[in-house]
Amino acid sequence: MEPAGAPPQGCAPAREAEEPPGSPALPAAAPQGAQPAAAGRERCRRGAGPQGPPGRAVRGRGRRAPGRRGGEEGARAGRRPRVTVDSSKAKTSLEALKISLRQLRWREFPFGRRLPCDIYWHGVSFHDNDIFSGQVNKFPGMTEMVRKITLSRAVRTMQDLFPLEYNFYPRSWILPEEFPLFVAEVRMMKDSDPSWKPTFIVKPDGGCQGDGIYLIKDPSDIRLTGSIQSRPAVVQEYICKPLLVDKLKFDIRLYVLLKSLEPLEIYIAKDGLSRFCTEPYQEPTLKNLHQVFMHLTNYSLNIHSGNFIHSDNANTGSKRTFSSVLCRLSSRGADVKKLWSDIISLVIKTIIALTPELKVYYQSDIPAGKPGPTCFQILGFDILLMKNLKPVLLEVNANPSMRIEHEQELSPGVFENVPSPVDEEVKVAVIRDTLRLVDPQKKKRKDVQCQTLEHVSEANEELLDAGPADRAECDTTQSPEAGLPSLCLKQVFPKYAKQFNYLRLVDRVAALFIRFLGVKGTTKLGPTGFRTFIRNCKLSNSNFSMASVDILYIDITRRWNSMGIDHKESGMCLQAFVEAFFCLAQKKYKSLPLHEQVASLIDFCEDQLAALDEKRLVCGRGIVERRSAVVPCQTDGLHLTPAAPTPLLHRMATASKFSDYRNHRY
């Protein structure tokens, strides 16, 4: 696979048009010339020319000077409508968003707007506002999907299908329901390898910023008090041999833009942040298990350490740019190209694991045919590098911090927000270039350009005859991208789709699930929908009766509902449907590996449904033709006599002929 970029030649920022992903991030400062232009616009609004003294604004419409009509029309055509952004719910990302909007010269509405905006920037979730148009920077259901338990289940499903491709995620168990399984598997592994002395990390499901995380050496050390019952958790194998820089453990925060679900479109930021622990790393022992500043890389924890270093330099301190770490690794002879390739693969595979259920949430909140916004979202991927440079996924954040300042204690109990140059360098570029990619005016500008292509040759001939000064006056429009650095976000999907599309089996299973949901806005499949799926796909036979279908539905649905999965609706969730689908695949294709069994059953179901749709289409055409049949009109063209009605018995015979092709009610 083509890597995201070449290894950096040095730590100085590169300024080429295609900046390699391993190089430092693009500067977040406003482009040269932006401020003078803004100042010029302000002076013009006050009624003076760009270089003249401020004057009183002229009200009403002034007279046009003779011969200047064409110039004014050209200037009016050059004035493009500015993109409008509602930032009233932006929360902690507000400052970085404001800087981005100033650089783009877009219009911000910090207190909301009565009229619809082009883009709504939410700080927490899709439901921060009731939106019926435009674009919003959150997907419905994303917060639920990247919770530790849901993410672990989604990745585990993919590990069942493709164990080698998904070995970047640590072995995980879900507490409390899988605690007996956890104990049994650890005991079995210790019996088979007495030298194995593992460490495990326990992470509360809804925890963030390191809250509630702790390390254990044995399953008996898990705090099975009332808290674990009321606060489920994930326990994972702890990575005991991480890559160290300056003898410190660190992780990487990479920013990933999910621009679209259908079609799937993914971008990765060319730079990220490296968050360092504040105490030299030692492998876990019973004595140091509780030293969080040694083992946990969370910024929100380490900032309270006396060893935490705030630095204005991207190459030093407790928070650095990822590109600066790549420079260090490159100087040691590490293969940075392969590292980037592995990271890209990890990100794409993780998104592929998340998208099936995201599509279920999406159709629930924004049903097809109803008004609603389109969505995009910036995700924070937390990645740990092992000693051999293999990337390991720690977690995915639906709301990565976009703060560009930090608190500094001036005196005991007195804090002040201080700008963080490292954060600003990375985060402003990510937000700004995300907005550039979702710019709603971009398509309109392309359409206008296509319409004016036919006039280009005539305009060029006129400009060739004109002098340099005339050509400068004629250039009344300027590209909105002018003066901005190249994009810091690199597309990785569909660019590499051919290499990863074979993994999207659960995506196709989710499409079957959504087809049979029936009621718009629901996320659970009822027993009627499940029976219709079985019947339409012709999966029942003498060995698998409809009674067996009902038993399968009840058993799997009851077990998933007992796990505490969303009780707002009754029925079968997507994860339960996937399990049932795997069972059906194993019954039908016994001699194949699981992923081939599932792929074969998907092909079979899709073929059956395609044939059914074709028959329904033919049936529908026949009915329309019979209804539209009329007796030829009279010569005067005034009287139209309908065809004689079809006899009742004949209609019943015709209807019975197509009875197998209709939707069943049970």
Image: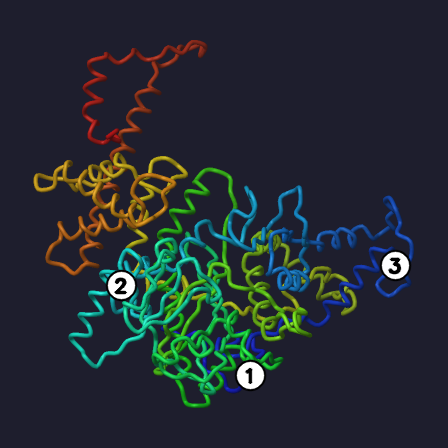
Mark 1 nearby-residue class (10 Å; few <14, some 14–19, many ≥20):
some
Q: Looking at the picture, tell me which residue is in the foreground, 418 or 120.
A: 418
Q: Name the secondary structure under disc 1.
A: loop
Q: Residue at x 36, y 66 (%)?
A: 202
**Residues at marks 1 and 3, CA–CA distance in whole angstroms:** 47 Å
Please state which of the two labelled residues, at mark 2 or mark 3, is closer to the viewer. 2
Label located before the other in sequence (1 or 3): 3
Residue 438 appears in the rendering: yes
Measured along the vertical axis of the image, is residue 360 above or below residue 179? above
Please state which of the two labelled residues, at mark 1 or mark 3, is closer to the viewer. 1
Image location (x, y in percent) of residue 494? 40, 61
The residue where tag 3 is placed is 48
The residue where tag 2 is placed is 159
Question: Residue furthest toward the front?
Answer: 225
Label located before the other in sequence (2 or 3): 3
The residue where tag 1 is placed is 315
| Quarter that holds the C terminus | top left
Please indicate whether residue 291 sits to the left or right of residue 81 in the image. left
Amino acid at dot 3? Ala
Q: Looking at the picture, tell me which residue is in the foreground, 288 or 325.
A: 288
Amino acid at dot 1? Asn
Image location (x, y in percent) of residue 518? 34, 36
Image location (x, y in percent) of residue 256? 47, 64
